[in-house]
């Protein structure tokens, strides 16, 4: 099995040496660079699955490097910085970073974050379906064989109707489904002015799978039409 390659870019040799131990012990190949310019050169000659990019570095800092990488590449990028102000985090994320981690950090937490981003990247490339019975949308996993749903690895208990609606939206992710279409498919009967019924079930679903029901991540409302699930 091919080992994933992590490119870590930091001018602190101690951090590079420490994370080299953690990554290699967990089965990753690790490349090291001390500034953004070196990182760009490595990307031209190596296949890299994820980049960890420090912000404050000589020659070329992490922000400039992130911007240049994003011009040609969609590799997951985790930015590191001792700066904790929101404006600094916003700068990194707005330039294309996938996550912003502040120093000092826990090596185990950073390792877990790396695994998460690599897993998501694999799911995206493979169409989000690791096996024929599972629908995976980011941290939401729907198993159509066992009728189970997990969010962030925690099982969520759904009623059969809620499961039918969620599965329908997941199979058609990215497509807006009208309320009558949802009702006809989930209830298997003609739509008879049952908008309130659909809305109530959507609300209950969101309460179970969404962290923020006011700003839902998975089930989006398309006003005047219906609902859709984003292809995250």
Image (cartoon, rainbow, N blue to C red):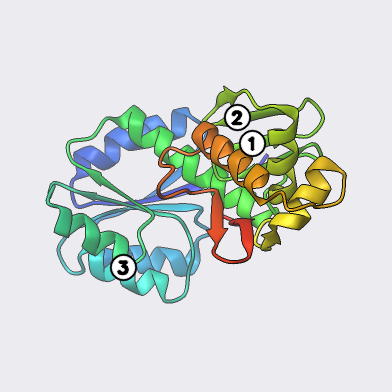
Q: Is residue 91 left or right of residue 189?
A: left
Q: Residue at x 58, y 37 (%)?
A: 205
Query: Label 1, label 2: how many angstroms apart (C-alpha)?
Result: 5 Å
Location of residue 181 in the rendering, given as x and y in whole percent from the top left corner: 77, 56
What residue would you read off at disc 1? 141
Q: Secondary structure at mark 3?
A: loop
Q: Residue at x 37, y 68 (%)?
A: 40
Q: Is residue 108 above or below residue 194?
A: above
Q: Is residue 59 left or right of residue 139?
A: left
In this orientation, which residue lies closer to the viewer: 197 or 67? 197
Query: Which numbered disc flags the more N-terminal residue, 1 or 3?
Result: 3
Q: Secondary structure at mark 2?
A: strand
Location of residue 122 in the rendering, given as x and y in whole percent from the top left corner: 61, 49
What residue would you read off at disc 2? 150
Query: Which numbered disc flags the more N-terminal residue, 1 or 2?
Result: 1
Picture quarter with the C terminus: bottom right
Residue 229 appearing in the image: yes
In this orientation, which residue lies closer to the viewer: 172 or 78? 172
Query: Which numbered disc flags the more N-terminal residue, 3 or 2?
Result: 3
What residue would you read off at disc 3? 95
Residues at marks 1 and 2 touching, judged by CB atoms closer than 8 Å: yes
Query: Label 1, label 3: how many angstroms apart (C-alpha)?
Result: 29 Å
């Amino acid at each position: 099995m091919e080992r994933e390659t992590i490119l870590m870019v930091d001018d602190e040799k101690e951090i590079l040496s420490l994370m080299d131990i953690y990554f290699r012990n967990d089965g990753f190949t690790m490349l090291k660079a001390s500034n953004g310019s070196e990182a760009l050169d490595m990307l031209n000659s190596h296949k890299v699955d994820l980049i960890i990019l420090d912000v404050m570095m000589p020659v070329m800092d992490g922000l400039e490097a992130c911007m240049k990488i994003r011009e040609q590449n969609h590799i997951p990028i985790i930015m590191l910085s001792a700066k904790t102000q929101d404006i600094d985090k916003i700068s990194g994320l707005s330039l294309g970073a996938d996550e912003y981690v502040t120093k000092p950090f826990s090596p185990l937490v950073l390792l877990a974050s790396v695994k998460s981003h690599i897993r998501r990247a694999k799911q995206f490339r493979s169409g989000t379906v690791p096996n024929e019975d599972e629908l995976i949308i980011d941290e939401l996993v729907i198993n159509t064989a066992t009728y189970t749903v997990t969010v962030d690895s925690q099982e969520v208990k759904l009623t059969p109707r809620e499961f039918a609606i969620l599965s329908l939206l997941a199979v058609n992710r990215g497509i807006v489904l009208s309320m009558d279409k949802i009702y006809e498919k989930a209830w298997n009967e003609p739509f008879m002015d049952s908008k309130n019924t659909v809305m109530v079930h959507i609300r209950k679903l969101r309460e179970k799978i969404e962290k923020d029901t006011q700003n839902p991540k998975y089930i989006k409302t398309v006003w005047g039409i219906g609902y859709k699930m984003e292809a995250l």
